[in-house]
Image (spheres, grey):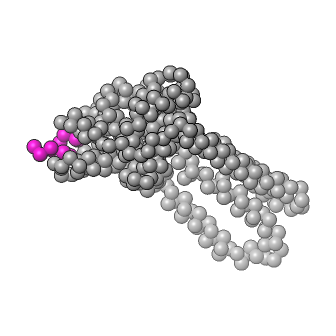
Amino acid sequence: MDQQTHYAEVEAEYAAALSRLARAYEADADKRRDLLQEIHLQIWRSLERFEGQCSLRTWIYRVAHNVGASHVIRERRTYASLVTLDELEGMASPPVADRAAALEKLGVLIRHLKPIDRQVIVMYLEDFDAKSIGEVVGLSPANVAMKVHRIKNLLARRYWNNGR
Amino acid sequence: MADEWKDLWQGQPPEGARIVADVLRKRAAEAARKRTTERIGHTVRVAVLTAIAIGGIFAVDRPLQRILFGITALWNLSGLIGVWHGLRLAGEAELGSCVAFCRAELQRRRRSLGSAWLLQAGPVLLFIATLAYPAIERHGLVARMLPFFSILALWLVILAVQRQPLLRAVDREIEELKNLEKAAGV
């Protein structure tokens, strides 16, 4: 398959997921549009060299998260204020019951994390299993499992009680 | 509970217009052209300054001035490394993991915080100082300009000290990422 065919597959299968991924890296709508275009551009460029070294899904998520991480690292002031999952667990935050508010809060929470933890939580929410997350991010399965466990606790205990 | 969060996240409406391949092809070509132009522009600037500095070595008589021109030329040439080994785009890094990419980005940032400004501004300042040196010496300006040079030196020291906490924070992050890579068996 050529670059064009692969990209058509990306468009058909992953456009919505890439749009969500951009939300995890940029809160501002205009900047997010630019970031999403950059993600598509870098995926397009990379597909020229894609020869089935890994699954297409792993490939495009790696590129997309790399573009996102690069975007975050370049924003020096913002980057300095980012935290790890460990640090986030220690921060107080009241639960929210409303769906829209919960989504907004989830976005803020994700954008508050350092790139690696951010990648893990986004892929977890996209329903990737631990092995696939490890493959994209480059973490050991044990490390991914530990982070996913923390994410589950964080989401269950602190951020949305869904009216319960 | 966790699945509810997944549903919530995945239920977001997609944003942005559909991006067609033709537009991407054009943007990719534009980006490549821009990058090449920037690199050539910087290389030409370095080449011109180096040529002038080398010319200066043969044009002047004072040994100190010759040495300073030589240092300027070498220092200036070392700035080229940053241009040709600069930013690696995400689309070129797809074979490495995200951890490896983040580490490389942070290392690049560390270089830019630590020494890149010295490679760019340093040779130009030294070149100007070398050119001005005979006039300053001839008119006995060295003593009179001492306060200015002292303030300049103090400013450079303050700048270097201010950067230290930032550099240490970036170093810590790089170390953490290296540990993650080790744990993953990379």
- Residue A21: image location, x then y, percent: 38, 41
**For the stretch drawn in magenta, what is the main secondary structure?**
helix
User: Residue B177, can we see it?
Assistant: no
Residue A152 coordinates in the image, percent (x, y): 23, 36
Nearer-the-camera pick, A161 or A145: A161
Q: Position of residue B16 (x, y in %)?
A: 42, 46
Q: Nearer the viewer, residue B88 or B60?
A: B88
Identify which residue is drawn at 71% across, 78% down: B144
Q: Which residues are magenta?
A: A150-164
Relative to residue A107, is residue B179 drawn left or right?
right
Q: Nearer the viewer, residue A1 or B111?
A: A1
Image point 57% across, 48% down: which residue? B111
Query: B14 above or below B162?
Result: above
Q: Is residue B160 above or below residue B104?
A: below
The residue drawn where x is 51% and y is 39% is B20
Locate residue B168 relative to residue A142 in the image: left or right: right
| Quadrant of image for the N terminus of chain B | top left
Q: Is residue A29 above or below residue A39?
A: below
